[in-house]
Structure formats: structure tokens, C-alpha cells
Image: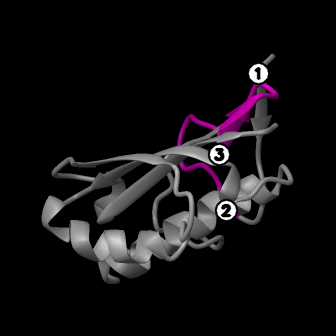
Amino acid sequence: MKRVVSTDEAPAAVGAYSQATTNGDLLITAGQLPLTTDGKLLNDEPVADQTRQCLHNVAAILESEDLSLDDVLKTTVYLDDIDDFDSFNEAYSEFFESEPPARSAVGVGAVPKGAAVEIEAIATTG
């Protein structure tokens, strides 16, 4: 059965979606923007800083379910500008130093709210 996951340690959903959902085997996060928990959008910050904030948000959601980034099986990354890939990748690598998850990264031309990056994750709970 599906269960909604929510934590105050990550930004609240800004639309008709949940921060994450789980079926007990997998936890799937919504795309995380570079938003702080108080709702400040870091869209004027460099893509590396925005990446770090997105991944801090993903980590906070996972931690609310006693999981960590080590449990992530797959991430999908949406970049406003694919030319930001190297800067994004350098910051991303700080969070997944060994045995990183599978990943897709695509240039989409526009990320919600004018951000440079959005990251979603699928984690195993077992």
C-alpha cells in the first residue's frame, strides 16, 4: 500500500504532490528544488550550491524514514542548462563518494521556479 512521507526537515511541497511516497519496499521522492526549509529559493546561487541544497533535501526526506543516501538506487537530475553538468557533477559527487546510485541527467531548458537543477531519487527500504 502507498504511504505518503512528509518531514519538516525538507521544504514543504509547493503543489499537488507529496515530498515522497513509499510502498514499504521503495521510497520515491518528488523532485527537490534548491529550496531551504524556510522556503528560500537559491536560484541566484551557482549550480553547485543549488545541487547541494537539492541533495540535502533528498537526504532529509530519507532520514525521516531512517534511510540515507546510501539507500538510493537511482536519481534523475533535471538541469536547466546541460552546460552546467560539470559543476553539478562535482557537487553531486560529494554526496555519493563510493557506490553511487544509477543516474540519469538531462538538460530540460527550464526547471520550475527558475532553478538551475531539480533532483529526484528512488531508494530501497530493505
Tell me which residue sits at (77%, 28%) in the image.
25
Tell me which residue sits at (54%, 71%) in the image.
97
Provide residue 32's location: percent of width, then percent of height: 51, 55
Q: Which mark is residue 2?
A: 1
Per the image, the residue denoted by label 3 is 19
Sooner in the amino-acid sequence: mark 2 or mark 1: 1
Per the image, the residue denoted by label 2 is 59
The stretch of residues the image draws in magenta is 10-27
Mark yes or no: residue 44 visible: yes
Q: Residues within 10 Å of mark 2 (few under 14, many from 20)?
A: many
Task: Select label 2 or label 3 by which is in front.
Answer: 2
Provide residue 31's location: percent of width, then percent of height: 49, 47
Return the residue found at the far right.
Answer: 66
Between the C-alphas of marks 2 and 3, the distance is 12 Å
The N terminus sits in image quarter: top right
Q: Are marks 2 and 1 in contact (CB under 8 Å)?
A: no
Badge 3 amino acid: Gln
- What colour scheme does the image use? one colour
Badge 1 amino acid: Lys
Q: Measured along the vertical axis of the image, is residue 116 above or below residue 29?
A: below
Provide residue 66's location: percent of width, then percent of height: 86, 54
Q: Nearest the camera: 1 or 26?
A: 26
